[in-house]
Structure formats: structure tokens, C-alpha cells
Image (cartoon, helix red, strand yellow):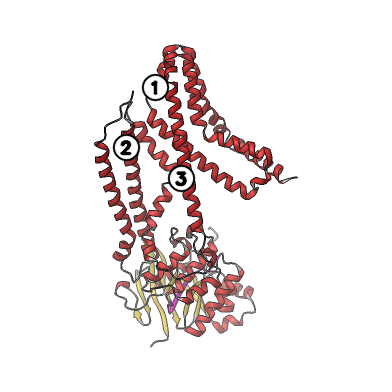
Amino acid sequence: MSDCMLQIEAADLRYGSKRVVNAASLIVQRGQWIALVGPNASGKTTLLRCAAGRLPPARGMVRMDGSPLYPVDAWKGELPGFAAAPEELPPFLSVQQSLAIYANAHGLADVPAATLTLCRELGLGPHEHELVRHLSLGTRQKLAVVLALLTAPRLLLLDEVFNGLDIRSALVLKTHLRRQVAEQGLTIVLATHALDVVKDYCDGLVLVDAGAVVRSWEGSELRGFSGTAELERALAAALSPADPGS
Amino acid sequence: MTARWWWLRLLAFQWINAWRTSPVRRTLMPSAWLLPAIALPAALSLAGEAPAAAGMDWVLSFDTPLELLLAAQVGVAIVALGSRIDTESWISPATTRGIAGKALFAARLLGTVRWPAGLALAALLLSLGSPRAAAHLFEMLLVDAFALVGGASLAWLLLGQRRQAASTAEPASSQLSHRRGLSALSWVPLREANRLLQPRRLALLAVPVLLLAPMGTAAQEVLRAVLGWTLLMYVASWWRSAAQVTRALERWMPHATLGVQRMRWYIWRYVALATLIGAATLWFGWRFTAHRPAVIKP
């Protein structure tokens, strides 16, 4: 079995005629937690959607476990867990219904006990019967992550999931994910702006700018930064200067 | 400052603020009641016997639609008052309000029956202007009384339903439990349609049917049309909600192992069943009521 969990090779990604990602290449090793960092609208979410099997590349190749992911209908393996944006969650379902329907729709008879434990740890218990439309952003964010983890995927794609999370829930989630990586060999790709998470929890960092992968840092290099301020300065220096006209 | 005065001050500020933010609406609202309830009937009454009698005949020609509209208005107004009291009791419990609070509650309760009261006033003014109109006064007051009873019954039903829904919505336990989900999915389109067709919106939807009823239409015919129209609105809403739920779930779980067709089966099965029951009810109801002798208006 190859050590490479996800490989994106010179992928062009488009929404209609608009090209968002341009010949991006990315390799994620099994059992690593990689952060995708970059300015707004740099193509991080688009790369994640492509890796999740939701956006086929116009050009290039996406491989999971060494096999081409696209066309998705022909893919025989297990698809990555993808924490959908909170606004993509169905507003008409309660928390409990969302969990149960997601489990049933993915071939599970019941919601796994581990998922219910994580729900309780994240404080979703009291919101069990509330409709998604009545939940706060942070609570919806927690639900999205719990759902992505429900099928115990080997690759987890998270899109800015720490936004809107309270301190305690963020700590619970970070610790849980780190434990999953260490004990279960889970691979995570996290698009984020939270540099503290990147520095303290991730095994690598990939900087994306204007739809292209600009530079990457290994985990040992990340630990070498004295703090998030130094990491921030290094990232800013690696980015292309902002267009003065914009 | 006592809780009572604090609460009254809060209400006063709310009232002043409402005048400041929408002065035109606040000015027009009382005149929308004063004009048909007092100004127009008084003018007709002063104009002479013939206009007053004609006015009374014209109003009476709408008896059934008018009765249904008034009942709906009273019902919706009482339910709205109930919601407002629930909200305010959170800020200030009813026991702390004293006489002023009780008087305010009585005034608000009177406000819920402002349109039946307006109709009674109009009838009284018209009957003063013409003996022929006075002969129909009892009939008009009967329409009013039926509307009041109908509205109060509607409010009682709606408030009871809401209390029941609130009690079942409370979590049975704070522990997340295992539950099968797909069978619950079948109820979602019906629940969403029910949420969409709230009583206020349903009352508005019934207005075109009531206005289209020709003068002198039998009460049974008007009721039949309103019930049929309401059922059609429900069927259309079930279908619309089911389509929305299908789209949302396919977007949420594009690669679910459960096939698209099976997911659609779960979403649509109760909608299909409810549609069939609705169509059967409409057909049997139409046939059954068609054989009843029509109620001829005097």
C-alpha cells in the first residue's frame, strides 16, 4: 500500500468558464494533518471540493490511495469525509435527524457510539431536537464536523471548521482530531486561517495563492517558528504582493 | 422603580417608537377601521333611507364570506395576542402587573374583536337611518355572533395545537440517542408545508375565493370552495416542499451509498399518500355535498 493518501497533479479547477485553480499539485501522506493556508478566494475550498469528489478537474489528475478518483461514479473505494459549509446543512432537519439520516444514507444502521460521544463532548446534546435553521453558526459548524467524521473516513477534509467555535469546543475538537491522527492513522487536510492550530497541531503547511500552490513547510519547520507571529511574517513574505489597484 | 412601572414604561416606549418609525402606517391603521365602521355608515344613514337600506343590503349580500373572514381575523388576532403575552411574561410575569396590566390586557382582548365590533357598529348606524335596514339588524348581529364564536373556536384549536407541539418539542433527554433516520425523513415535507401554511397565510389565501363568490351564493357552496381551495394549497405546498427537500439532500450528500431513487422514495412516499387522500377527500366531499339540498338565502 502506498504511503500517499491524496495526490493532486497539475489540476485545473473551474466553476463554469472561471478558472479558480491553475495547475495545482499537492501530495498528502497517510496519517498526516496538513493545513491549507492562503488569502481569501485563493482556491483552498475549491481544492478541498475537488479532493472530496465534488468538483472534477478540467485538466490534471486526482488520485486517492494511488487510484484515480474521477470519474467518481467509477470509484470503488471509500470517499473522504468532507465537512460541508454550515449553510449546506439541511435547515429543515433537527440535529438528531441529521445524524440518523446521514448514517442511514451511508449504509449504517445507527449513529455510531463514538459519534454520539463526540457530540456530547462538543455540547451538541442540548440541541438534539433543534432544527438546523435555529442553530448558531458555531453549533452548525460542530454538526458539520461530526457528520464528516461519522463514517470514520481515512481522509478528512475540513474547510475553516474552527470559525465560530467557542474556546472549549475548539480545544475538544483539536484534541480529538490529533488523537485520531496519532491512533487511527487518520489523514486530515484543513483549510484555515487559524495559525495557532497550524503551528501546534499540524504536520505540514501548504500555502495557496491565486489558485496555485506557492510553498510548503514540513512539521519540523513549523515547530521551528518561535510563535504564530513569526509564522505569519514568513507566510506574508512568501505571498505575492497585493495588487495596489485592488 | 417597581417591576410594574418598569414594564409599563417599556410598553410606552415601544408604542412611541412604533409611531416614530412608521407614522403613516400608525395613522392609517385606525382610519382603516373608522372609515367602514363609523364614517361610511353614518354618512349613508344621514343621506337618507334609501342609501342606508342599500348599504345594509350590500353588506348582507356578503354574509357568509364576511362571517368566515371575521372568524379568521378574530382567531388569528387571539393567537397573536397569546404569542405576545407569552413573550411579555418572560420579561414581566403577569402576577407583577397589577390593575394597569389587567386593564391593558382587557383593552388588547377588545382589540382582537375590533372588526366584528366595527360591523355591529356599522349595522347599528345603518339601521338608525332606515326602518328597512333596521329589520335586518338582527340578521347582521347573528353574523357577528357566529364570527365571534367561530374565531374563538379557531383560536382555541390553534393555541391548543401549539401548546401540544411545544411540549413534544422539549427534549425527552439531554442524551443523544440512536434513532432510525430515513423514516423520519418522510415527515419532513409535510412538516415544512405546515410551517409554510401558517394560519395567517391560509386566511389570506382564502380571500380570493371569498371575494369571487357571487352575490347570494349559498353558504354551503362558499364553504365547499374554501375547503377545496385550501386542500389544493396544501397539496401544492407538499409537492413544493418535497422538491426542495430532495434538492437540499442531494446537494448535502451527493455520494451517499443509499441510491438517489431510494432517498426520493423516502422523501416522497407520504407526500404521495397525502395527495391521494386529499384527492379522494375532495372527490367524495364534492359528490356528497352536491346531493345535499342547497341553503337558499332569504
Tell me which segment is drawn in magenta: A152-165
Task: Residue at 56%, 37% (x, y): give it.
Answer: B109
Residue B190, above or below A167: above
User: Taking B135 as reference, is B117 left or right?
Assistant: right
Name the chain under label 3: B
How far is the residue under mark 3 from the one under mark 1? 32 Å
Kind of residue indicated by mark 2: Ala
Residue bearing the label numbered 2: B225
**Does dot 1 land on a helix, a strand or a loop?**
helix
**Does dot 2 land on a helix, a strand or a loop?**
helix
Kind of residue indicated by mark 3: Leu
Helix, strand or loop: magenta stretch: loop
**Does dot 3 land on a helix, a strand or a loop?**
helix
Residue B157: numbered disc: 3
Residue bearing the label numbered 1: B58
Residue A9, x across and y down, in percent: 39, 77
Quarter holding the N terminus of chain B?
A: top right
Crowd band around label 3 with a 10 angstrom C-alpha radius: few (<14), some (14–19), many (20+): few
Judging depth in this view, the residue of A211 and B41 nearest the camera is B41
